[in-house]
Image (cartoon, rainbow, N blue to C red):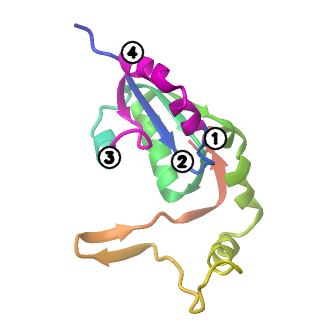
Amino acid sequence: MTTKPKFAMYWAASCGGCEIAVLNTHEKILDVDANFDVVFWPVAMDAKYKDVEAMEDGSILLTLFNGGIRNDENEHIAKLLRQKSKILVAFGSCACEGCIPGLANLSPVGDIVHTAFNTITTDNPNEIYPRTSYDVPEGELHIPTLSQGGSSARTGC
């Protein structure tokens, strides 16, 4: 029995439309499973970064990378999937052209965060902002740090 080639898909900073479009192929999505061993696809399955990190370099035949690189987590996963994949495809307009996430390149990161937490629809009188790490009983949580001048997956890897 031959083993199926491995497939991965990642949703970085994007509108999410491409991932949903793939899932909206309905039962045809089963053809992907019939022809590939789906090893990483966080929007469609339980997937852990540590599982990808443990894979041999080049062991994934095809990765579709959807979205731009807007934070340190996106950058880490883009580089990880490039290392683990024989073929990495910038998939969708956000990955290739920037689109909605790319508009953030027009403003400094500080302005974006300030606007997100201080608009007419946001009640934040004490101006509380997210921290990059936080201690909880289970351990330390890390929140991705926004990058200034994010890039598309095409240029970010």
Distance from label 2 to label 3 (Cα)? 15 Å
Position in image of residue 98 (x %, y %)? 70, 46
Question: Up-down: is 138 above or below 54?
Answer: below
Position in image of residue 121 (x %, y %)? 67, 77
Looking at the image, tell me whether mark 1 or mark 4 is earlier in sequence order.
Answer: 4
For image coordinates 37% across by 16% down, the residue present is 34
Distance from label 1 to label 4 (Cα)? 25 Å
Q: Is residue 95 magenta?
A: no
Position in image of residue 128 (x %, y %)? 53, 85
- The residue that disc 3 covers is 48
- Quarter of the picture holding the C terminus: top right
| CB within 8 Å, label 1 to label 3 | no
The range drawn in magenta is 18-46
In the visual, does 72 lie left or right of 136? right
Looking at the image, tell me whether mark 2 or mark 1 is earlier in sequence order.
Answer: 2
Distance from label 2 to label 1 (Cα)? 8 Å
Looking at the image, tell me whether mark 4 or mark 3 is earlier in sequence order.
Answer: 4
At mark 2, the secondary structure is loop
Where on the picture, by quarter, is residue 127?
Answer: bottom right
| CB within 8 Å, label 2 to label 1 | yes
Marker count (numbered):
4
- The residue that disc 4 covers is 35
At mark 1, the secondary structure is helix
For image coordinates 66% across by 81% down, the residue present is 118
Q: Which mark is residue 12?
A: 2
Task: Specify the amino acid type for callout 2.
Answer: Ala
Q: Dot 4 surroundings within 10 Å: few (below 14), some, or many (20 or more)?
A: few
